[in-house]
Amino acid sequence: MEQVSARVAALAPSATMAMNQASRELKEKGIDVINLTVGEPDFFTPDHIKESAKKAIDENNSFYPPAAGIAELRKAVSAKFKRENNLDFTPEQIVVSAGAKNSLANAMLALINKDDEVIVPSPYWVTYTELVTLCEGKNIIIRGTYENNFKVTPDQIEEVITPKTKAILLCSPSNPSGSVYSKAELAAIVKVLEKHPHVFIISDEIYEHINFTGKHESIAQFDSVKERCIIINGVSKAYAMTGYRIGYLGAPLWLSKAIIKLQGQLLTGPTTMMQVCATTALNADQACVKDMLAAFTRRKDLIIDLIREIPNVEVQVPEGAFYVFPRMTHFYGKSFNGKVINNSDDLCLYLLEEGHIGTVSGDAFGEPDCIRISFATSDDNIVEAMKRMKNALAKLS
């Protein structure tokens, strides 16, 4: 007899993982699919980080780690926050987890109570709303418009704050839209939040180093709200270390202690050897980060040029991350060979089956007008994928 818990039954499966799996299954059947679904750099982990993994094994870093993370890594994260963001998080305020997703989940489980309201600007990463649901909180969605580059305004935020509001979830650079909040835009949001001291700020900054604007701005830099900020980050995107599963957060000390208690029961801690590698990544020369940013910048320019050659596809230039999020509403209601495109789900399935390219429906991100396309792949793949997209879309009428 199946008796899945209500909390798990309420969760939706990850749309990005579902489309990734569908792309893989077609590929396994011998079909040449270009998979643009996943948020994963296609680079290999830099050699100096891989060498530290080998050394960590040889030096027998194979015992249980502290629940908060090894001391060396917590110090490295604290130093990174100060060096790169001018943020003062002591090592005691840092908690290391199995990826930024794990860090985000820990923060929300330690903070959100049943029926607490969490403001989630859309488009949002698919996991945000599901974690609020898991915490038995209430998602309060506010929509960032295409015309405003998918950013929400201070007025939109103020409009939905109530006494039940516990937190707002921000992501800059954004997955899926690639939008980046400037210092001035964050300052305007802070002006609103200053009037509501009961509202915490959870800021997902995992794409910090894939930023085409020249400088990352963290909302925790503002003194008036810094004691309410939880900053989520990790090594996956910047250092091409997705499989190492190391994320971290900086939070008020009382909350960090609560998260450590929680993690001690759920995880103990992420793999010790991988924490050594993450320490190396943060402390070593950062040339590899700049090299990967240069490649992503080139790919961003390439895919934007190619998409703009496709009739009736509208696209904003991403300011960060490695996604484009084009508006595709022109194709809704059109059909080919009896298949009608009613929404972004239908369109992504059509592009997979007819064009053999994997993309992700905007519905999963709270923005049904769009689809997400990752350009974390080779230039050749980008060129061929956009050629396939152009040809597939041209068949719709």
Image (cartoon, rainbow, N blue to C red):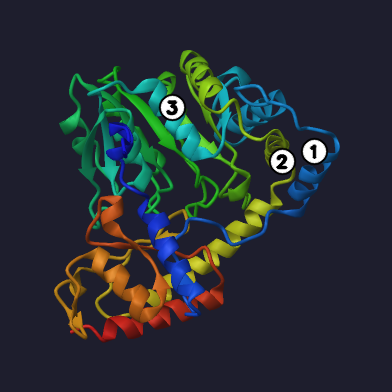
Q: Residue 86, percent across and down?
A: 56, 30
Reading the chain from its start, which is encountered first: label 2 or label 3? Answer: 3
Instruction: Give the side of residue 381 with respect to residue 53, left or right.
Output: left
Q: Residue 219, percent across and down?
A: 42, 32
Q: Residue at x 68, y 35 (%)?
A: 275
Question: Which residue has dot 3 on it?
Answer: 107
Question: Which residue has dot 1 on it?
Answer: 56
Q: Residue 223, percent across and down?
A: 43, 21
Q: Nearer the viewer, residue 110 or 286?
A: 110
Question: Which residue has dot 2 on it?
Answer: 277
Q: Amino acid at mark 1?
A: Ala
Badge nearest the viewer, 1 or 2: 1
Image quadrant of residue 81?
top right
Q: Dots 1 and 2: beta carbons under 8 Å? A: yes
Q: Residues within 10 Å of mark 1 (few under 14, many from 20)?
A: some
198 to 152, vertically: above or below: above
Q: Amino acid at mark 2?
A: Cys
Examine the rendering and report whether any part of residue 137 can be seen: yes
